[in-house]
Image (cartoon, rainbow, N blue to C red):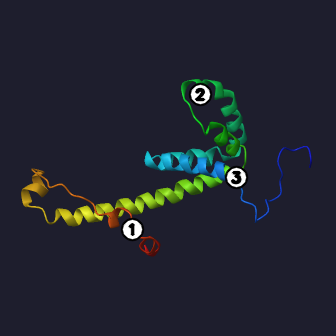
Amino acid sequence: MGFFKGSTEFPPPDKPPLPEEELAVIEKVAQKVVERRLSVPAILFLESVKPLNYIGSQAMVFFEPVVQTIFNFKDYNTLRSALEKRESIEILLQKIESLDADAYTREKRIKKYLKQEKKKWKWYQRWLGIFPPKVKIPDEILNPPENIKKDK
């Protein structure tokens, strides 16, 4: 079927689905979503509009003059060209899910450490919140080595 835009066949397995610069922009978008703790709404939205990704990229073309006058995005065109491809939404979803899982495990480690530290506080610090000591979270809690990440 030569009159359809894009191919209906699977891409070759040795070729990456997206170029490196598009993958970098998708990674940035996923990091911003997870930083703002919007991963669940973003996943719901992206799953619901997955069939409309090409129409969304064309809407980005329509709104480009307005967006470029208000904001100065360097990666706007790269993101738009990435969203034209069908597999880009699934790649973005996978990045958001993996980054969110990493953030969740990091948050659990920090809460566990803080709970252990609070047991060392005096009663008025723990229960009344008066003069709580400053707690510095060690780097091995914030960023554990790779072998510890894989075990848990």
Q: Could you say whether the residue bearing mark 2 is in a helix, strand or loop?
A: helix
Q: Are marks 1 and 3 in contact (CB under 8 Å)?
A: no
Q: What is the three-letter code of the residue carrying label 2?
A: Val
Instruction: Say which label, 1 or 2, has the lower sequence index.
Output: 2
For the residue carrying disc 2, how many other residues have a C-alpha within 10 Å: few (<14), some (14-19), or many (20+)? Answer: some
| Residue 12, numbered label | none
In the visual, does 48 lie left or right of 135? Answer: right
- Residue at the spot 58% in from the left edge and 57% down from the top edge: 94
- Label 3: which secondary element: loop
Can residue 89 be seen here?
A: no
Few, some or many residues within 10 Å of mark 1 (<14, 14–19, 20+): few
Residue of label 2: 67
- How far is disc 1 from disc 3 in space, using C-alphas? 31 Å
Counting every numbered tag in the picture gives: 3
Q: Quadrant of the C terminus?
A: bottom left
**x then y, percent, for residue 118:** 18, 62
Mark drawn on residue 144: 1
Asked if one can make out residue 141 in the rendered structure from this viewpoint, the answer is: yes
* Residues under numbered marks 2 and 3 in contact, where contact means CB atoms less than 8 Å apart: no
Type of residue at label 1? Pro
Q: Tell me the residue at 43%/57% (across/down).
A: 103
The residue nearer to you, when weighing 46 against 92, is 92
Q: Could you give the CA–CA distance between mark 2 and mark 3, rounded to whole angstroms?
A: 24 Å
Q: Hey, what amino acid is under mark 3?
A: Pro
Compute the Cα span from label 1 to label 2: 40 Å
Residue 142's x, y, as percent? Answer: 35, 61
Residue located beneath label 3 in the image: 19
What is the quadrant of residue 15 in the picture? Answer: bottom right
Sequence-wise, which precedes: disc 2 or disc 3?
Answer: 3
Left or right: where 124 falls relative to 93: left
Q: Which residue is drawn at 47% across and 56% down?
A: 100
